[in-house]
Amino acid sequence: SKVRHFQWEVECMYSSPDCLEHVVIGINGQFPGPTIRAKAGDTIVVELTNKLHTEGVAIHWHGIRQRGTPWADGTASISQCAINPGETFAYRFKVDRSGTYFYHGHYGMQRSAGLYGFLIVDEHGKRELPFHYDGEFDLLLSDWWHQSVHEQQVGLFSKPFRWVGEPQGNSIVHWLQKFSNNASVSQCKFSGNEQCAPQILQVHPNKIYRLRIASTTALASLNLAIGDHKMMVVEADGNYVQPFEVDDLDIYSGESYSVLLRTNQNTSSNYWISVGVRGREPKTPQGLTILNYIPTPASELPTSPPPVTPRWNDYDHSKAFTKRILAAKGSLQPPRTHDRRIILLNTQNKINGFTRCSINNISLTLPSTPYLGSIKFGLNNAFDQKRPPDNYDNSYDIMKPPVNPNSTHGNGVYTINFNTTVDVILQNANALAENVSEIHPWHFHGHDFWVLGYGEGIFREEDEQKFNLENPPLRNTAVIFPYGWTALRFVADNPGVWAFHCHIEPHLHMGMGVVFAEGVRRVGEIPRAALACGITGSF
Ligand code: C2O
Ligand code: CU
């Protein structure tokens, strides 16, 4: 295994994600940021210099478990202090397992501002691969707004509340192809060399391609389809799954998949690849690009129409897809029982007239001293010492807007006993408006969890009987459907402090998250630079 060094400068720059020029946050003059490519077992060192003039920065390595290096998780206020303008911080961590991952800003809403890129870990040797393929394309999906992130943030913290709205116009997808430039898909008329021109997937007939697809969207749930072709799903969030064939793929923010594409169609034609919005009434046009069969000219338009994205609110379609994802044979099985169950009710609330999101009626506000330091050093004045609740009031009617919408801010921590097995039930509910319940993709740092099951309405004790303990998929992100619940199980075997939150960036910003701490006494020496702020700053 190798040590791979990178020197990055994070900087604002002009770019045209959807053909309109905007300020984005880039890395070394690139937007999206450079792809990190490594092999399982390698060590990655990123020396990151903050060249933003007026704000801090932190980068999270989404899907990397950071075993033994919880201070490198890149979550401002949780695992480290934001890196100040002009400062350099070295992220050093091991990528212990192959898979499709990505990285993104984890301070304020810097992910929405464009701070993201791919992190792909190849199998150590070809023998480890449970499937064969001839070529690869890497597609990082994102969404884009014309309003600046600062404007979005101010809106979310205003009275009356101003929601960010749906992503703008033809601006939805960045396609990244291995070793090549990136561009966003849109329906503008391209001459071919614009920054925002869609990446064309050029393929040879009768081959198998691996498409790595990851979603770093701020908001949008997406659906990807390739005209006249099926896809075989083989990987989800860095774990192999039992291969299954689909016509289209639902993907939520924070998820990643690998699919195998067989180029076995009429080779004298090209085909549309489409990406459309799911789960919210789409005001964003479908993103389109072309699957180009060599030697057909790339400029030749497909003869069959672009695939139609399933109706935005066809949740049965989404659920059917989600339930087909099962662990590959030979995957790690979950413990048969749990030591603790935490039920997390997701609601939309009001605090002093401001619209917030809450978990068990607490809206997360991050402290100024990172938890990793304050817990390790036993400081009891750095965050709420009151433990957040493991459950919610059982008279709460999840099908209706809250009777009492008021909640409170908080930053207490769920302390998990080391090496215990924890079940988390994510319970969805109605939002503030009647008949509204949204999708929330929940992402856990530092771990994979088993997804034991999904259900409708309120989770009840007897639902436990229906848990899949045989081949539940291991993932780091799982969705809760409107008015439903999702059951997860994990083993608290990774000393550190870990964020667990809705991956919709404005929702996290509105408080939709919790913090789990486990085995913090076992955490090794934390680099000073990670804690140079708040109370630990004067140590
Ligand atoms: Cu990819 Cu805490 O997020
Ligand atoms: Cu959410």
Image (cartoon, rainbow, N blue to C red):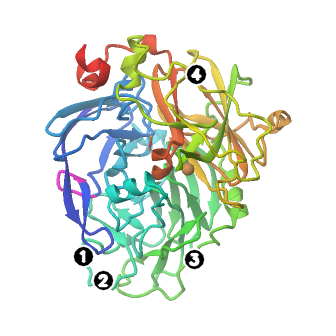
Disc 1 target residue: 194
Q: Nearer the viewer, residue 411 or 1?
A: 411
Tell me the crowding category of disc 2: few under 14, some 14 to 19, or many 20 or more residues within 10 angstroms, Cα based.
few
Q: Nearer the viewer, residue 194 or 374?
A: 374
Q: Is residue 321 toward the left or the right of residue 396 in the image?
A: left
Q: In the image, is the residue at mark 4 within 8 Å of ligand 1 by its beta carbon? A: no
Tell me the crowding category of disc 4: few under 14, some 14 to 19, or many 20 or more residues within 10 angstroms, Cα based.
few
Q: Is the residue 383 above or below the residue 486 in the image?
A: above
Q: Is residue 283 magenta?
A: no
Q: What's the CA distance linking mark 3 and mark 4?
A: 53 Å
Disc 3 target residue: 228
The amino acid type, in three-letter code, at marker 4 is: Arg
The amino acid type, in three-letter code, at marker 3 is: Asp
Say which element carries label 2.
loop
Q: N-terminal of the two: label 4 or label 2? A: 2
Q: Could one spot residue 354 in this view of the protein?
A: yes
Quadrant assignment for the C terminus = top left
Instruction: Report the disc number at residue 423.
Output: none
Q: N-terminal of the two: label 1 or label 3? A: 1
Magenta region: which residues?
26-31
Q: Is residue 58 toward the left or the right of residue 9 in the image?
A: right
Q: In the image, is the residue at mark 1 within 8 Å of ligand 1 by its beta carbon? A: no
Q: Could one spot residue 527 in this view of the protein?
A: no
Q: Nearer the viewer, mark 3 or mark 4?
A: 4
Cβ–Cβ below 8 Å for labels 3 and 4? no
The amino acid type, in three-letter code, at marker 2 is: Phe
Q: Is the residue 383 above or below the residue 120 in the image?
A: above
Q: What's the CA distance linking mark 2 and mark 1?
A: 7 Å
Residue at image point 74% right, 34% down: 393
